[in-house]
Image (spheres, grey):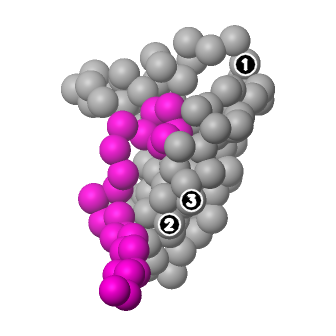
Amino acid sequence: MLGQLPSAPGVYVVLFDCMHERLVGSSDIAYIGKATNQNGLRGRVRQYFHPGPTQSTNLAMKERLWEHDCSLRVGFTTSKSKADAERLESELLIQFEIEHGELPPYNRQRALGALIRTVPAQEH
């Protein structure tokens, strides 16, 4: 599977094969991430399944993902640029949070480049 991923930048979604209850509704999404390094999607996703001994974040993520009683799937889309991948990741995280009242279970924070939502000022 990993060898079939492109080396282009993009956004990937790790999905459970079973639904999990969220604050609002349920979802099969475990994590939303971006791949903006030189190896693109192939390199970034590979790090989760084959982390090096010094990649503590990837080792921890691998353990968390496999602690559930259902298998995992990975979906992805390529982007034309790193900036496009960052923007799409931010949009997906914001949309998930709007729909479920929280981020996906393994996203600890919104992407650094998250879009800022503004509320229109009320007229007095």
**8 sits to left or right of 118:** right
In the structure shown, which secondary structural element does the residue marked by tag 2 occupy?
helix
In the picture shown, does residue 47 fall above or below 87? above
- Residues 29 and 4: in front is 29
User: Which corner quadrant holds the C terminus?
Assistant: bottom left
Instruction: Identify the residue at image location x=36%, y=31%.
Output: 58
Instruction: Identify the residue at image location x=49%, y=41%.
Output: 102
Residue 70, label in figure: 1
In the structure shown, which secondary structural element does the residue marked by tag 3 occupy?
helix
| C-alpha gap between disc 1 and disc 2 | 27 Å
Tell me residue 71's x, y (percent). Answer: 72, 23
**Mark 2 near mark 3, Cβ–Cβ under 8 Å?**
yes
Residue picked out by circle 3: 95
Tell me residue 64's x, y (percent). Answer: 48, 19
In the structure shown, which secondary structural element does the residue marked by tag 1 occupy?
loop
Q: Which residues are magenta?
A: 102-124
The answer, for residue 3, to whether it is visible in the render is: no
Residue 91, label in figure: 2
